[in-house]
């Protein structure tokens, strides 16, 4: 039996929690909760003494794997690459299955979020595109064909 019980969430550290939250709420995520964390627990888990963060958890409608957005208030966040390339080491992207890829891409483009490349089709079963989200991270959107 596997020691892993379930996939709970993916965390993204952001500079502007409200802007990034609005992006994901616009994709259809629902806010599960928002809080501030500090103290011995947080210092121990993240390995940064005397830190303080604001955390917001989003989940898709009906539940499922969550998305944890964190904004560090103390210490100041360290900048990453402003627009990391898909081949840059580290967490590269997060992918979501969607119902209407074209409509979502149109809405995101209207909000200033553009394709990283183009819309591709995989073996006649998926249409997929990568979009540069707020703060430079990549969001993949995949729609089953048929």
Image: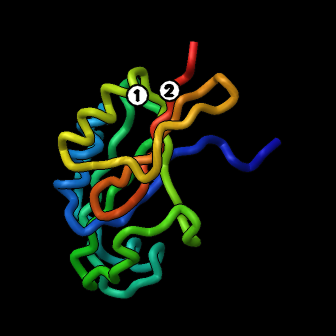
Residue under label 1, please give it.
101
**Percent position of residue 108, x then y:** 26, 40
Task: Say above or below: 130 vs 80.
Answer: above
Q: Nearer the viewer, residue 127 or 81?
A: 127
Judge left or right: residue 120 versus residue 34.
right
Which quadrant is home to the N terminus? Answer: top right
Q: How many marks?
A: 2
Residue at 45% x, 75% y: name it: 46
Q: Are marks 1 and 2 in contact (CB under 8 Å)?
A: yes
Q: Which quadrant: the C terminus?
A: top right
Residue 143, disc: 2
Whether residue 22 sits left or right of residue 120 in the image: it is: left
Residue 45 position in % (x across, y down): 47, 73
Residue 32 sits in which quadrant? Answer: top left
Q: What element does badge 2 sit on?
A: strand
Q: Nearer the viewer, residue 70 or 102?
A: 102
Place of residue 134 in the rendered image (x, y in percent of width and height, measured from the top left):
28, 57
């Amino acid at each position: 039996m596997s020691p892993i019980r379930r996939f709970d969430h993916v965390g993204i550290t952001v500079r502007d929690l409200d802007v990034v939250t609005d992006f994901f709420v616009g994709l259809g995520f629902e806010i599960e909760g928002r809080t501030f964390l500090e103290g011995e627990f947080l210092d121990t888990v993240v390995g940064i003494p005397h830190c303080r963060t604001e955390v917001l958890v989003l989940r898709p409608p009906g539940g499922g794997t969550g998305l944890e957005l964190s904004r560090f208030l103390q210490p100041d966040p360290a900048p990453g690459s402003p627009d990391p390339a898909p081949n840059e080491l580290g967490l590269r992207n997060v992918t979501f299955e969607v119902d209407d890829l074209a409509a979502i891409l149109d809405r995101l483009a209207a909000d200033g979020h553009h394709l990283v490349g183009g819309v591709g089709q995989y073996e006649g079963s998926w249409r997929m595109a990568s979009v540069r989200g707020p703060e430079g991270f990549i969001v993949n959107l995949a729609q089953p064909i048929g």
